[in-house]
Amino acid sequence: MKKNIILLGTVLAIASVLIIGFTTVNITETNNSKSIADKTIAIENQTTEDPNRNGIPVLYYGVDTRFAAVKKSDIAKAKTIYAFLNEGEKEQIAHINSVRIIVIENNQQSNKQEYSSDENLTNAQLQLIKSLDYFNHFTIRTEFKEKNKETGKLDERFFGPHITVVPDTQAIYVNGKEALINYLKEHSKDNMNVIKDEKLGAIKLSFIITKEGEVSNVKHDAMTTGYPSIDEKFMKLIKNIPGKWIPAENANGEKMEQELVFTFGPRDGC
């Protein structure tokens, strides 16, 4: 009897040790798993953090004509201001009060202006815009009434779209516009580290695509980012764009030079 009691006690003791050991291992493994999980979450959080937390705003890169492009051949056929307005601008107009054609020189409105009282272009207005050369600019200052969708009343409004006169065939970058923008982004990204507290201005650099399809006459055209190192970097990048361009052509198929403008800055400010 005593032997049976001793034997039972021994079995219970061994079982207790095994259970305690198993529980300890499970607790340890659970704690280790939690620790690994916490580290994984931490890594994932690091990779999904706001990329702009270091003070760099959302950036805009663009290469295009200075203003909205209108072909010189289309100007020759224009009869009303609607030839120069986009669909959104057309839809706003319920009644036109006045239209003023104003030539833009040196990024400012000049005194070369012609007035009309409705959408029909006068002979003087037509003569003015037809006299403009390629890559000259003008604006159409339009005073009009727009129907208020809530009240049904006519509200006084105005807009002044800016327009650039372009040839029938504009210059084309042989590698494509997306490749051009990627080149400018990739080769300037290290320079963005100087930006502080999202304080960044916009810059415009103008350049000419020659009849031979090469970049020339790069100019710091207007404004500044506020960081000379960024301004200088983009000047260098524009001067050294790799590859060739297909030059612009006029309505007769003759090759000609074209001005383009590179714009960079915060997306909300360009």
Image: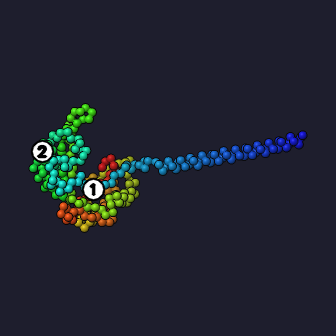
| Position of 217 relative to 194 (above/below) | below
Q: Amino acid at mark 1?
A: Asp
Residue beneath label 2, please? 116
Task: Categorize mark 1 by other alpha carbons within 10 Å: few (<14), some (14-19), many (20+).
Answer: some
Residue 153 image position (x, y, % from top left): 22, 33
Task: Categorize mark 2 by other alpha carbons within 10 Å: few (<14), some (14-19), many (20+).
Answer: some
Q: Seen in the image, is 26 located left or right of residue 68?
A: right
Q: Seen in the image, is 46 located left or right of residue 144?
A: right
- Viewer-proximal residue among 8 and 268: 8
- Viewer-proximal residue among 15 and 107: 15
| Position of 233 relative to 201 (above/below) | below
Viewer can see residue 105: no
Residue at 90% x, 40% y: name it.
1
Q: Secondary structure at mark 2?
A: strand
Residue at 79% x, 45% y: name it.
14
Residue 5 image position (x, y, % from top left): 86, 40
Residue at 19% x, 49% y: name it.
83
Residue at 21% x, 35% y: name it.
154
Residue beneath label 1, please? 64
- Viewer-proximal residue among 4 and 120: 120
